[in-house]
Amino acid sequence: MQKYRDNQALLASRLKEGQPAGDNYVHCLPDGMPAMMMGMFPMEIFQRPEQINITQEAFNQTRRIYMNQKLPKWDEVDPSFYGASVGHWEGDTLVVRTIGFRDGLWLDTSGSTMSDAAKMTERIRRPNFGTLEIEVTVDDPKTYTRPWTVSMPQTIVLDTELIDEFCLENEKSSQRMNAK
């Protein structure tokens, strides 16, 4: 795939190919990062001293954050939807650095993308009983002229369980996506 610094050019090329703008879910693809953390689907967070796992209800996907380790080198990472993440605590804030993303991940339904050169830093904290604050900084010199940051406050729903969610279970909408 050709590299674009202009997201509008990339969006136009994908729409011309018949791809809906940023709608990975219709094609049974995971959201990737940082969309996974935006709260469209419920998540469970499991914490152990050496690792934090975040499981999303959609596709039963699990993101792994390895604690207190060195970030791997670029050539040691197989590109993926969630990349390779390492974290550490700064007081009550979990700081997560991630590299190793698949090239061309959709970040939103507007067609914003991220390249395989992206580095992401998340700052996650729980300021009170029902809130999770997530701040994400994306540094992607192939796609954006400078790093950018977005805040994604989340509501915590306690004492619930994830349900089994499988892609294409009674899915009907993709048949109409490219209707002539």
Image (cartoon, helix red, strand yellow):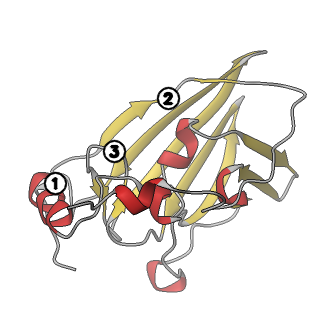
Front residue of 98 and 58: 58
Callout in the foreground (2, 3)? 3
- Looking at the rendered structure, the number of numbered marks drawn on it comes to 3
The residue positioned 36% from the left and 36% from the top of the image is 149
Decide which of 79, 22 is in the foreground and name it: 22
Q: Amino acid at mark 3?
A: Thr
Residue beneath disc 1? 7
Relative to residue 158, is residue 123 depicted above or below? Answer: below
Image spot of residue 124 (x, y percent):
62, 35
What residue is rendered at 22% in x and 80% in y?
1
Q: Residue shown at 17%/72% (left/top)?
A: 3
Instruction: Give the quarter of the figure containing the C terminus.
Output: bottom left
Q: Assign a secondary structure to mark 2.
A: loop
Residue identified by numbered label 2: 152
Q: Residues within 10 Å of mark 3 (few under 14, many from 20)?
A: few
Residue underneath mark 3: 109
Left/right of residue 81 with respect to residue 140 in the rendered view: right
Specify which label sits upstream in the sequence, 3 or 1: 1
Q: Nearer the viewer, residue 126 or 178?
A: 178
